[in-house]
Amino acid sequence: MPVLAISGEDDAVCPPSDLESIARNVRDGRHVSLPGRHILNIESAGAFNAALTRHLLE
């Protein structure tokens, strides 16, 4: 099952490097970093929805 790890560029709780590591260490993993902190579906709603839609359609 493909994995999409989405991080916020300014997230101190779960930094992009953590999500990059997850994506790199699972089969068919991909990482996307978006503007924002921790609640990206609200902070970067358009970019979050676009990334998720692309992932689900692939």
Image (tube, grey):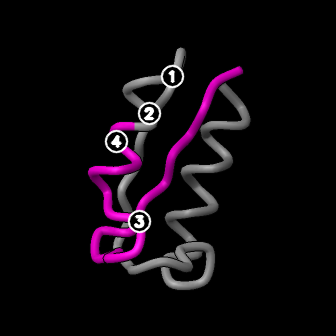
Question: Which quadrant is home to the C terminus?
Answer: top right
Mark 2 sits on what residue?
23
Q: Name which quarter of the figure residue 45 lies in.
A: bottom right
Question: Is residue 54 shown left or right of residue 20?
Answer: right
Residue at image point 41% right, 41% down: 31
Q: CA distance from mark 3 to mark 4?
A: 11 Å
Q: Position of residue 2 (x, y in %)?
A: 64, 24
| Residue 20: mark | 4
43 lies left or right of 2: left
Q: Cα distance, mark 4 to mark 2?
A: 5 Å
Name the residue type under label 4. Answer: Glu
Q: Determine the residue positioned at 49% across, 54% down.
A: 6
CA–CA distance in space, label 1 to label 3: 18 Å
Does dot 2 land on a helix, a strand or a loop? helix
- Location of the N terminus by quadrant is top right
Outermost residue, bottom direction? 43
> Are the residues flagged by discs 2 and 3 in contact, CB closer than 8 Å?
no
Classify mark 4: helix, strand or loop.
Answer: helix
Disc 4 and disc 2 in contact, CB within 8 angstroms: yes
Magenta-tinted stretch: 1-21
Q: Look at the picture and state if 58 lies above or below 55.
A: above
Residue that mark 1 sits on: 26
Q: Residue at x 35, y 37 (%)?
A: 21
Pointer 3: what residue? 14
Circles 1 and 2, Cβ within 8 Å, touching? The answer is: yes
Question: Real-space Cα distance between discs 2 and 3?
Answer: 14 Å
Residues at marks 3 and 4 touching, judged by CB atoms closer than 8 Å = no
Q: Counting other residues with Cα less than 10 Å from the Cα at mark 4, is it few (<14), some (14-19), or many (20 or more)?
A: some
Q: CA distance from mark 1 to mark 2?
A: 6 Å
The residue mark sitting in front, 2 or 3, is 3
